[in-house]
Image (cartoon, rainbow, N blue to C red):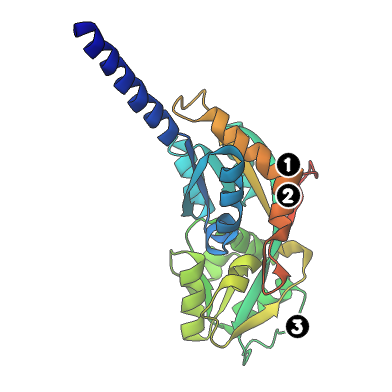
């Protein structure tokens, strides 16, 4: 009887252990709000899970916050869009390798009435100078996200020290892209946004695209495994499987196939080593 009970206990333990292992076949990805809010992850992740059985949980943050999450070891993979910050993360030893995945672009949106008179321009420098010179309301995310970092760089390239030159027209909200767009819509202000979030945004109101097509508005995304040598809790095998799938022909096609109202939101470019 004792032996039988012991065998049953071992069998039950094995079942629970197996169940726990199965439940643990998941990774946490710290990513930008644009990949989540646009619906891209809702499109990609079911395909990946069907293929691998790995469940991907996403924490959508600004890129700066996502990188800090990775630096603390609180995520397995980073999927972000601020190349300089990503390379710094790698140089500090917190990431294993950066893989280019896809790109789209930023657009400057503003009220249909266009008080700045910049609609149709392809020159983001001139547009930013006009906003500053005329003191026209501009909404900045102010949250250290990839979009915020891109915005700050654009002011710098335009020859404007925004920290010194900003006035009451420049409004930093410290929130995500959706909140920035809502604020701009409610106050007839201008705002820089990634195109994917713009296309999926429902509350456009009187906002329209004012400036697009400048090569300086290019927006590259990269993916990295958090370094398990620094954080042993990182699920290296599952995380790398996710990365490998994203940059594979199957993953790249899935990215290209994601569209809203027939318009492609992201363009795969994993084959470009310099991206």
- Residue 40 at what x, y percent from top left? 60, 58
Seen at 51% across and 26% down, the residue is 228
Residue on which disc 3 sits? 120
Residue on which disc 2 sits? 252
Q: Where 94 falls versus 127 (above or below)?
A: above
Secondary structure found at label 1: loop
Residue 18 seen by the camera: yes
Q: Nearer the viewer, mark 1 or mark 3?
A: 1
Within 10 Å of the Cα at label 2, are there few (<14), some (14-19), or many (20+) other Cα atoms?
many
Towards the viewer: 109 or 270:
270
- Residue 7 at what x, y percent from top left? 29, 12
- In space, the residues marked 1 and 3 are separated at their CA atoms by 37 Å
Secondary structure found at label 2: helix
Q: Where 148 falls versus 166 (above or below)?
A: above
Seen at 71% across and 42% down, the residue is 247
- Residue 45 at what x, y percent from top left? 57, 50
């Amino acid at each position: 009887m004792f032996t039988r009970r012991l065998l049953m206990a071992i069998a039950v333990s094995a079942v629970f252990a197996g169940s726990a292992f199965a439940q643990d076949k998941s990774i946490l990805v710290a990513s930008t709000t644009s990949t989540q809010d646009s619906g891209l992850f809702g499109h990609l992740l079911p395909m990946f899970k069907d293929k691998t059985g790995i469940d991907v949980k996403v924490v959508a943050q600004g890129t700066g916050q996502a990188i800090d999450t990775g630096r603390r070891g609180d995520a397995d993979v980073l999927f972000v869009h601020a190349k300089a910050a990503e390379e710094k993360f790698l140089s500090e030893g917190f990431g294993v390798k950066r893989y280019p995945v896809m790109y789209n672009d930023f657009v400057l949106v503003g009220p249909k009435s266009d008080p700045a008179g910049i609609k149709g321009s392809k020159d983001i420098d001139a547009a930013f100078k006009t906003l500053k010179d005329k003191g026209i309301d501009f909404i900045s995310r102010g949250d250290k996200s990839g979009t915020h970092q891109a915005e700050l760089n654009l002011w710098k390239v335009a020859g404007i020290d925004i920290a010194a030159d900003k006035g009451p027209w420049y409004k930093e909200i410290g929130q995500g892209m959706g909140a920035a767009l809502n604020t701009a819509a409610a106050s007839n202000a201008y705002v820089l946004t990634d195109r994917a979030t713009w296309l999926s945004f429902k509350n456009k109101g009187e906002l329209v695209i004012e400036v697009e097509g400048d090569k300086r508005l290019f927006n590259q995304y990269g993916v990295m495994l958090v370094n398990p040598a620094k954080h042993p809790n990182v699920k290296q095998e599952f995380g790398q499987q996710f990365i490998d799938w994203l940059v594979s022909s199957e993953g790249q096609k899935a990215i290209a196939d994601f569209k809203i109202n027939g318009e492609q939101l992201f363009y795969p470019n994993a084959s470009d080593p310099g991206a």
